[in-house]
Image: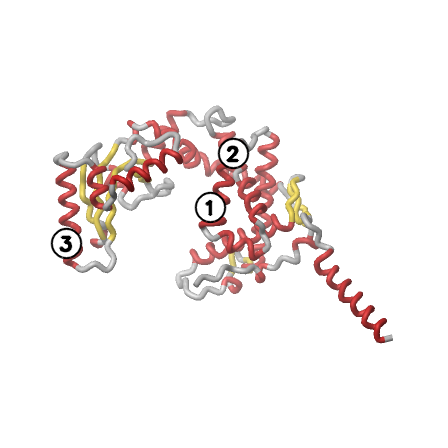
Amino acid sequence: MKLTKKLIALVIVCIMALSITGCHKQNEIAVTVNGYEFTSGYYMCALVNAYSEGQSTVYEAKEDKTDINYFKEKIDDKEFSVWVKDRAIDLLEEIGTYKKLCDDKKVKIDDETKVEAENTAFYMWNYYGYGTLFEPNGVSYETYKKFTLDSFCQSLYFEHLYGEKGEKEIAAAEVEKKLYETFIIADLIDVTFGEETAEKKAETKTKLEGYLNDLTSKKKTFEEVYKLHNNITDEEDKKEEDDKEEAETLKPLDEYAQILGAKDGGYDHDYFDDINKMVTNEVKLITKKDNAGYLLVVKKDIKSDPYYRDSLDMTVRHLLKDADFEKDMEKLFKEAKADINSYAVDRFKVKNIKEPSYS
């Protein structure tokens, strides 16, 4: 009799265990959008992304950014948890929309884009801490990699519309005009003060003024000044140059030139206006606001280097057409209704999302 009771109890435990875990199959479909099926793991990836986005939204809106209890906050008049759940579905509707548009227009993800997406996923997962956020929440690296690849459909479809030979191609003259209005290039030595003494700051200014004189008189090239300032040896420079050659096929003519952008240009620089007023090859030492440091500048000519016309092409097209693109896409997102498997989705709770612990 005791044995029978033990067996019954064991059976009950097994049934309970199966009801908790066994019924959720591997690769269970949680959400379907436009015929594209997204697994529970993929949904969780969207949920964690939405959670991070929600935190950033709340953080940016708060004046007092210490000890924020996100679950007591609201976004767009929604409780934080509700907003995160809704945003996760929005993300899947957006991805499902872009995938359908790309398929309908026969826009294929080429090998170069796949490699770029995989590299992006690898670096974000391993070097930007995403692995420590997603993995504890049940999102595998393979799922995260697929999510990243699917996200690239947005830029591919944009390029299909507004890129060269696209359906709504932007005239080359318009692209160039916007490019040269928004971006400049310059060689820079940037010094920002921390806790330096007044004496140390004075020494720094004297050193930079010496560089200024050397550059103005052409006694030294910017490369020589840059290496001197940063204590770069020829061996270190050779290794860095080899690494760059491996990473880049098309390179700028001036390897030290930096892209500086006007406000909201993507390469925003606080001293863009000051540097933009300089003439090509002019050398200037700019004192930062509130005497926070110095900026040694050699203004260069962005128009003389074809590298920037190529490398900034899509950036400029986005600046010109993002507003139109987003407006058109919002209409399509509203038409994309997600078919939600509540049984699969409801078990994921926003309050149970685990965050990395930092020492």
Amino acid type of the residue that numbered disc 3 sits on in the rendered structure: Ala
Kind of residue indicated by mark 1? Tyr
* Quarter placement of the C terminus: bottom left
Image quadrant assignment for residue 135: bottom right
| Viewer-nearest residue: 107 or 356 | 356
Q: Are marks 1 and 3 in contact (CB under 8 Å)?
A: no
**Which of the two discs, 2 and 3, labels the residue nearer the N terminus?**
2
Image-based side of 220 in relation to 245, left or right: left
Pointer 2 residue: 156
Disc on the earlier residue, 1 or 3:
1
**Whole-percent x, y for residue 29 in the image:** 68, 47
Quadrant of the image occupied by residue 6: bottom right
Image check: 19 left or right of 195?
A: right
Which numbered mark, 1 or 3, is in the foreground of this view? 1
The crowding category of the residue bearing disc 1, from other C-alpha atoms within 10 Å (few below 14, some 14 to 19, many at least 20), is few
Q: Is residue 70 above or below residue 26?
A: below
According to the image, label 3 marks what residue?
202
Q: Which residue is mark 1?
A: 123
SS of the residue under disc 2: helix
